[in-house]
């Protein structure tokens, strides 16, 4: 996790809020550093994490995780991390006979399917174990990313329904958190992606939006991060709060600074 | 105008966006209806019942009838707990109500219904629910007014469905605002009257009462964020931005070269003191042609 980002979000692993949906989106840049941040953040917070990883392999996340101070292999072995490696298990849909539907069963269906098997996988992974020996704090679902599900043939409403059920189970019933990444297609007209992004934005408590700089690529400033807090839990009259920072990604950390205040240009 | 939204019957659309959310206004209007003694039905699809009821005190909560479609709207759990017929069935059941008092139906949200149901079916059901009072039952007894409040997320729908819902609605409230202050643009279509278009600034108090304001709050100051350390860009410069007193005086007393001041004007107009007249010495060249009949000779210079 990146300590500077924790400061900006005013949170630490021991006192993070529960029952929240966090939406990560990126436009004209790669926002996966936010996924790595939240993965290591929640593992350090001693949460039971279910990671639906559809984009990269397990070893990729493990290598980055080690730079950030978490060991995914050990977390998986002791039962703290349930990892669905989409790239590997997608093949199992076709080549392995399963008694119950595979989480990625929709890949086999000719017509527009739904994500009920994937939801059931998540629910079974995160439901509290009766033995109670493990003592994890609260469950967390992490998805990287949802836009690829649209490319695989699902409709935006099917993906929204999946997140709806995840919110109902993980956030409301189990008092855990959900973090999802969606790409913003930006200039490219992608109606389904826009419906997905806007629909999730309305449901989210926190939106982190990584954007490339409007002027193009820069060596010292990799992009800017917009943070929008929505739906404050105390029903105060305070409006939604929004902040913008610029950032630079380094080998083991990300540094944040106010717009125009990069150390390289001062 | 915002507080008299519920005076007319029919469908009221609350159009919100990601930046300006509308659920708090929906809850404020629900509270108003409950305090007026109306029966209030909530079709809850987007948030849990606890979250919707949060902030209301117990006497208001007792008047709310909550139809929960948040936990299992598509019947995936197959436990049989889901309400039969889904949200559409619940909405149709409200058309056939037997009690005749005024009732408010809050749809949280209409966007959810529009994404999951065909637009035509939804519009027909909404029309049947909203205009019940225009077709009284056979015995001629008056039917109480029906108010339908629909929360609609603008960015999720194309112009077709939005246009269809707009044409059904008596009143459309579009949420917006500037600088932290919320405003509502209210477009109201009364039968046989001109449509009215007004903007009302408002805020929602923590107990979900509606507080109307004249304009954007003047005492709203953007608060300085404690996270960003205030950095003075004028510190640690390698050049001098300030002038000393002597330098400032010297600068102010300088006259610019092309500035036409009164001193210059005087100097030009003053008659020149007599100077020695200047002579021109001319040595004619050898091949010079001194013509005696030079035409310039009669010039009297």
Image (cartoon, rainbow, N blue to C red):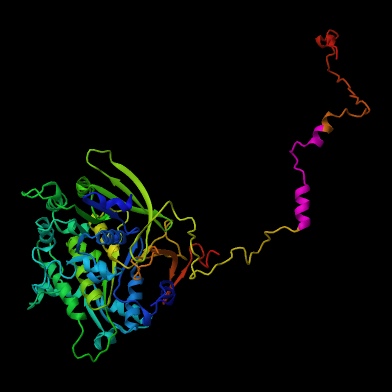
Up-down relation of residue B289 to residue B21 (above or below): above
Q: Which secondary structure class fits the magenta region best? A: helix
The stretch drawn in magenta includes residue B250:
yes
User: Viewer-proximal residue, A202 or A69?
Assistant: A202
- Where residue B253 sits in the image (x, y, percent)? 78, 47
Find the residue positioned furthest to the left. B138
Residue for point 29% across, 68% down: B56
Residue for point 21% across, 65% down: B64
The stretch drawn in magenta includes residue B175:
no
Left or right relative to B258: residue B182: left
Q: Looking at the image, can residue A145 be seen?
A: no
- Where residue A217 sits in the image (x, y, percent)? 42, 60
Up-down relation of residue A71 to residue B32 (above or below): below
Q: Which residues are magenta?
A: B245-265
Left or right relative to A66: residue B74: left
Residue for point 34% across, 61% down: B209
- Where residue A203 sits in the image (x, y, percent)? 27, 65
- Where residue B175 sits in the image (x, y, percent)? 33, 54
Q: Looking at the image, can residue B222 be seen?
A: yes
Residue for point 83% across, 29% down: B269
Classify residue B110 by image quadrant: bottom left
Q: Quadrant of the N terminus of chain A?
A: bottom left
Q: Quadrant of the C terminus of chain A?
A: bottom right
Left or right relative to A237: residue A91: left
Classify residue A198 by image quadrant: bottom left
The image shows a total of numbered marks equal to 0
User: Viewer-proximal residue, B283 or B165?
Assistant: B165
Classify residue A58 by image quadrant: bottom left
């Amino acid at each position: 996790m990146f300590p500077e980002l924790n400061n900006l979000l005013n949170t630490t692993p021991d006192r993070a809020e529960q029952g929240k949906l966090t939406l990560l989106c990126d436009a004209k840049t790669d926002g996966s550093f936010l996924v790595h941040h939240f993965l290591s953040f929640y593992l350090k917070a001693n949460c039971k994490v279910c990671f639906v990883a559809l984009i990269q392999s397990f070893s990729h996340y493990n290598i980055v995780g080690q730079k950030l101070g978490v060991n995914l292999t050990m977390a998986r072995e002791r039962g703290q991390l349930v990892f669905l490696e989409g790239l590997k298990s997608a093949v199992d849909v076709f080549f392995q006979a399963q008694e119950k539907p595979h989480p990625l069963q929709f890949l086999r269906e000719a017509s527009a399917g739904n994500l009920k098997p994937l939801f059931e996988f998540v629910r079974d992974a995160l439901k509290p174990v009766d033995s109670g020996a493990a003592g994890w704090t609260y469950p967390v679902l992490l998805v990287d990313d949802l836009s690829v599900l649209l490319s695989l043939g699902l409709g935006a409403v099917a993906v929204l329904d999946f997140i709806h059920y995840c919110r109902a189970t993980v956030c409301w019933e189990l008092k855990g958190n959900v973090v999802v990444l969606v790409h913003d297609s930006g200039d490219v007209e992608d109606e389904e992606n826009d419906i997905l992004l806007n629909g999730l934005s309305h449901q989210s408590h926190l939106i982190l939006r990584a954007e490339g700089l409007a002027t193009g690529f820069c060596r010292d400033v990799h992009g800017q991060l917009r943070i929008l807090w929505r739906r404050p839990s105390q029903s105060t009259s305070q409006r939604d709060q929004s902040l913008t920072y610029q950032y630079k990604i380094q080998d083991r950390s990300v540094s944040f600074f106010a717009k125009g205040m990069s150390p390289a240009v001062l | 105008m915002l507080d008299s939204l519920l005076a007319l019957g029919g469908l009221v659309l609350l159009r919100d966006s990601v930046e300006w959310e509308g659920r708090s206004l929906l809850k404020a209007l629900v509270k108003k209806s409950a305090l007026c003694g109306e029966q209030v039905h909530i079709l809850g699809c987007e948030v849990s019942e606890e979250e919707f009821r949060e902030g209301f005190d117990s006497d208001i909560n007792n008047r709310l009838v909550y139809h929960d479609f948040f936990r299992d709207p598509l019947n995936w759990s197959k436990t049989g707990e889901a309400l039969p017929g889904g949200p559409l069935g619940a909405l149709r059941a409200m058309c056939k109500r037997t009690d005749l008092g005024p009732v408010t139906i809050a749809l949280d949200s209409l966007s959810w219904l529009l994404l999951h149901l065909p637009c035509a079916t939804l519009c027909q059901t909404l029309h049947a629910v909203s205009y019940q009072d225009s077709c009284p039952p056979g015995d001629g007894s008056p039917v109480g007014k029906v108010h339908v409040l629909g929360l609609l997320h603008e960015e999720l729908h194309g112009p077709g469905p939005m246009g269809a819902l707009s044409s059904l609605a008596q009143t459309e409230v579009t949420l917006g605002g500037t600088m932290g202050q919320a405003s509502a643009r209210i477009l109201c279509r009364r039968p046989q009257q001109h449509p009215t278009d007004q903007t009302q600034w408002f805020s929602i108090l923590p107990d979900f009462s509606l507080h109307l304001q004249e304009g954007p709050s003047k005492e709203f100051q953007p608060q300085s964020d404690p996270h960003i350390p205030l950095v003075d860009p004028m510190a640690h410069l390698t050049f001098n931005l300030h002038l000393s007193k002597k330098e400032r005086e010297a600068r102010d007393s300088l006259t610019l070269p092309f500035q036409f001041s009164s001193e210059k004007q005087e100097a030009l107009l003053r008659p020149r003191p007599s100077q020695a007249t200047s002579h021109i010495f001319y040595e004619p060249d050898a091949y010079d042609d001194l013509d005696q009949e030079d035409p310039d000779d009669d010039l009297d210079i």
